[in-house]
Image (tube, rainbow, N blue to C red):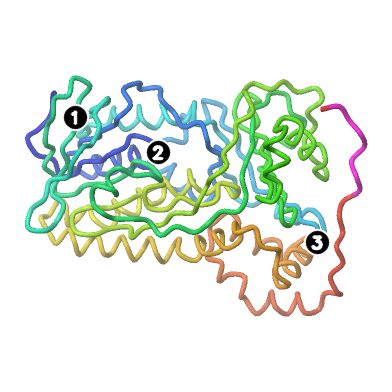
Amino acid sequence: MPGRDRYDVVICGASIAGCTAARLFALAGASVALVERRSDPAAYKVTCTHQIQSSAVPTIERLGLGPSLEQAGAVRSRPAGWTPYGGWLRFPADAPTGYGVTRRTLDPMVRGLAVETPGVDYFPGRAVVDLLADRGRVAGVEVESPDHTRRPFPATLVVAADGRDSTVARLARAPARVRPHNRFVYFAYWIGVRTPKSEARVWLLDPDAAAVFPNEDDVTVVAAVPHRARLPEFRADPELAYQRMVHDLPDGPELASAERLSKLIGKLEMPNKMRGAARGGIAFIGDAALATDPLFGVGCGWAFQTAEWLVGETRSALLDHGDIDAALQGYRRVFRRRLGLHQMQIADYSTGRAMRLNERVMFRAAAADPFVAAAVEEVASRRRSILRLLDPRLSARLIRRPPIREARAPAAPARAC
């Protein structure tokens, strides 16, 4: 194996979060070992919404990834939401855009960007099998290659970027706090879907949900996200149940002239997982830190952002031989402040409960009042805290609204599926 005897940082996992952290650490001057269990440089995650919220675009720009995304034809899209309490929310037409791009395109792209960065040594096909310790703190990892050769990677900082079922977290005895998810998902990739290409659409059907996310090359992800009470229906005939649910969406995607590019993919268990973002010598980013309901398309964006927050909080201590564990506590605080309330709100809604009165009032107002809708969009795109919705100016507008009446959109005309 090539490489150094010791690194400033060893990063376990070469997907979005790991590659973002590797490049940003190396650009700051750190030596980085990027370890990935998969050997294929074109490997990518399949079960994903592929949506990147606008809150992550500044990180993408600082990473230098934007031009490659534009060249690949990534869709610039804004969120759009429909509820039974007023129909489509009136989100601003000039709201910042995110990206719609498949992981098949994105993952190799961001991996290549990281690997080409001076200071990053890439070790594909290596599995992390143990942690190194020094005086009670994590001090590196031990990896195993396909021929079962083992090698230690001593490092000042270990970064776990290996997904929601993180091996590094298990080895570090850092269990996640798990909250139930009482919906499941069936989705497929389509081409030629008639849907607004600049909109990442979500239906909150109370209690079911659905999503349509356009991507590059006219590829669209169409997802049905039913409440768990409908599981017997989907298990009996997933194809029919999926087609029926998508067909019945108010102002939904037109699939009659579209072509399905994939099999129907089902994911029945999607628990919300969150763990402390850092401890002595180790940090967690991306899904290893927080894996939540994919309906809202936050996972990719939070992978970019958590990686940047970690680098921002620790690089000075890392390069100047400062107190790295104190710096890690700074990252932990930033992580909790920026994502804690969002995670609580998303996990709470993913229980499948009925919408509360305050939510129904807010959505009804956002379907008629652009001021309220703008605030909801800021939260939905995760650019602002959910405390934004406690703005007294919003409360005054909600109080003036007439009583709630459920206002489902007119039934769509019958069409072939």
| Type of secondary structure dominating the magenta stretch | loop
- Amino acid type at mark 3: Tyr
Residue 257, image x and y in percent? 80, 22
Residue type pointed to by label 1: Glu
Task: Sort mark 3 into few (<14), some (14-19) or many (20+) by Cα contacts within 10 Å.
Answer: many
State which region is magenta.
Answer: 410-416
Question: In the structure shown, which secondary structural element does the residue marked by tag 1 occupy?
Answer: strand
Q: Residue at x 81, y 78 (%)?
A: 400
Task: Give residue 16's mark.
Answer: 2
Q: In x, y percent, where is residue 152?
A: 11, 36
Residue at 59%, 50% in the rendered image: 296
- Residue placed at 86% from the left, 75% from the top? 402
Residue 294: x and y in percent read 56, 46
Residue 80 visible, this orientation: no
Going by the image, does 111 lie left or right of 343?
left
Question: Which residue occupies 37% across, 56% down?
Answer: 176
For badge 2, the amino acid type reads Ile
**Left or right relative to 150: residue 201:** right
Q: Neighbour class for label 2 at 10 Å: few (<14), some, many (≥20)? A: many
Question: Could you give the CA–CA distance between mark 1 and mark 3, rounded to whole angstroms?
Answer: 54 Å
Image quarter (top left, top right, bottom left or bottom right) of the N terminus: top left
Q: Which residue is mark 1?
A: 144
Q: CA distance from mark 3 to mark 2?
A: 36 Å
275 with respect to 245 (left or right): left
The disc label shown at residue 85, or none: 3
Location of residue 264 with respect to 273 vertically, above or below: above
How many discs appear?
Answer: 3
Badge nearest the viewer, 3 or 2:
3
Q: Which mark is residue 399?
A: none
Badge 3 or badge 2: first in the primary sequence: 2
Nearest the viewer among 143 and 112 is 143
